[in-house]
Image (spheres, rainbow, N blue to C red):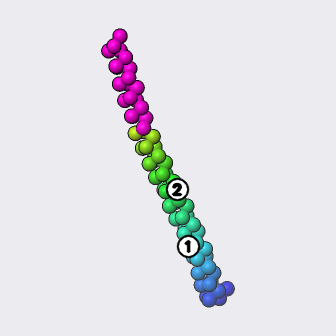
Amino acid sequence: MTPEERLDRIETTIEKHNEAIRGLIVVARTSLDSIQELREAQASTDEKLNILIATVDRIIRQRNGKE
């Protein structure tokens, strides 16, 4: 194998690796975006659940006070 052929082979391999890395970066960004959306949805759910708990607690305390 000539030095030029070797260099071409190395460059082709490097380019394939670069393409694979780019693909992994896209997957990583997509995963991070998805996780962030889950976190935001969970925070919203937590807030609503806390409001519900406070409401039920208030209703129970009012009923216990009347009896």
The C terminus - image quarter: top left
Amino acid marked by disc 2: Ser
Residue found farthest to the right: 1
Question: In this orientation, which residue lies closer to the viewer: 4 or 27?
Answer: 27
- Residue 64 appears at what percent x and percent y? 35, 15
Mark closer to the observer (1, 2)? 2
Q: CA distance from mark 1 to mark 2?
A: 20 Å
User: Quick check: is 53 in the magenta stretch?
Assistant: yes
Residue depicted at x 57% and y 66%: 23
Mark 2: give few (<14), some (14-19) or many (20+) Cα within 10 Å: few
Instruction: Tell me which segment is drawn in magenta.
Output: 48-67
The residue lying at 54 percent from left, 69 percent from top is 22
Is residue 57 visible from the viewing direction of this image?
yes
Q: Say if 30 sits above or below 47 in the image.
A: below
Element at badge 1?
A: helix
**Eyeballing the image, is 56 above or below 44?**
above
Looking at the picture, how far across and down is residue 10, in whole percent?
60, 79
Q: Dot 1 corresponds to which residue?
A: 18
Q: Residue furthest front?
A: 66
Residue type, numbered disc 1: Asn
Residue positioned 48% across, 56% down in the render: 32
At numbered mark 2, what does the secondary structure look like: helix, strand or loop? helix
Please say if 50 is above or below 32: above
**As rendered, which of 36 and 66 lies closer to the eye?**
66
Residue 25 on image: x %, y %:
52, 65
The vertical placement of 1 against 67, above or below, is below
The residue beneath circle 2 is: 31
